[in-house]
Image (cartoon, grey):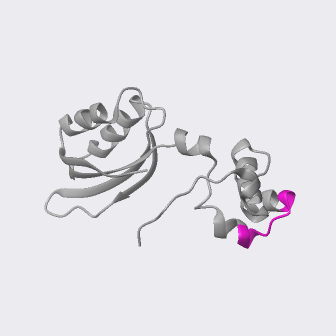
């Protein structure tokens, strides 16, 4: 099923959606240490928060957050993945997740999710640098959002 998105004026949203946004903002600002604490402050059940949290974003968050998923085939040698991660950090990318397969025939498949909202330069430049690294056989962006 294709996902559809809508921009809706704040006063048109149900209370649970507004409170979910409030909880997310409290957590982001550090005003609450846990979901339980933030939901309690907002007078929202945790189940309602978890129901809506992945589908509700303030417009300023959508414009600021840019996530990419990069798939790579790396030679199974010491330091190859570490060098790639250092390159991402040097370009102001923030690695969020790393998934690596067990190396087979000297190659490991690695998938990383990276926040590129603060990237110095463009994504194509970062990908060119990653691909040029010794030990990187393949690297491609397989998802963006």
Residue 80 position within the rendered picture, expressed as x and y whole percent measured from the top left:
26, 43
Front-lying residue, 101 or 132: 132
Residue at 76 percent across and 53 percent down: it is 11
Specify start and end residues of the magenta stretch as a single range. Answer: 40-48
The answer to whether any part of residue 81 appears in the image is yes
Q: How many marks?
A: 0
Which of the two residues, 39 or 76, is positioned nearer the viewer here? 39
Residue 34 visible? The answer is no
Question: On the picture, is 78 further left or further right than 23?
Answer: left
In this rendered view, identify the residue nearer to me: 124 or 1: 1
Quadrant, the N terminus: bottom left
- Tell which residue pokes out farthest to the left in this image: 105
| Residue lying at the far top of the rendered structure | 121
Q: Percent position (x, y) of residue 135? A: 18, 43
Q: Is residue 129 magenta?
A: no
Q: Residue 76 placed where, x, y %?
A: 21, 52
Q: Residue at x 44, y 38 (%)?
A: 116
Left or right placement of residue 31 versus residue 143 in this view: right
Residue 119, compared with residue 27, is above or below; it is above
- Magenta residues, dominant SS class: helix
Residue at the spot x=86%, y=57% of the render? 41
Identify whether 7 is placed above or below 40. Answer: above
Compared across the picture, whether 53 is left or right of 113 comes to right
Rendered view: 16 above or below 112? below
121 on left or right of 125: right
């Amino acid at each position: 099923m294709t996902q559809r998105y809508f921009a809706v004026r704040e006063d048109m949203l149900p209370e649970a959606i507004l409170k979910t946004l409030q909880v997310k903002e409290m957590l982001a600002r550090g005003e609450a240490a846990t979901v339980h604490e933030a939901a309690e402050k907002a007078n929202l059940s945790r189940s309602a928060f978890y129901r809506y949290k992945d589908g509700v974003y303030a417009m300023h968050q959508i414009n600021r957050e840019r996530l990419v998923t990069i798939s790579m085939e790396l030679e199974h040698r010491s330091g190859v993945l570490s060098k790639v991660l250092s390159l991402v950090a040097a370009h102001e990318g923030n690695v969020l997740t790393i998934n690596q397969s067990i190396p087979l025939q000297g190659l490991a498949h690695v998938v990383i999710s990276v926040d590129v909202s603060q990237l110095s330069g463009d994504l194509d430049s970062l990908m060119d640098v990653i691909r040029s690294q010794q030990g990187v056989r393949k690297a491609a962006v397989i998802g963006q959002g």
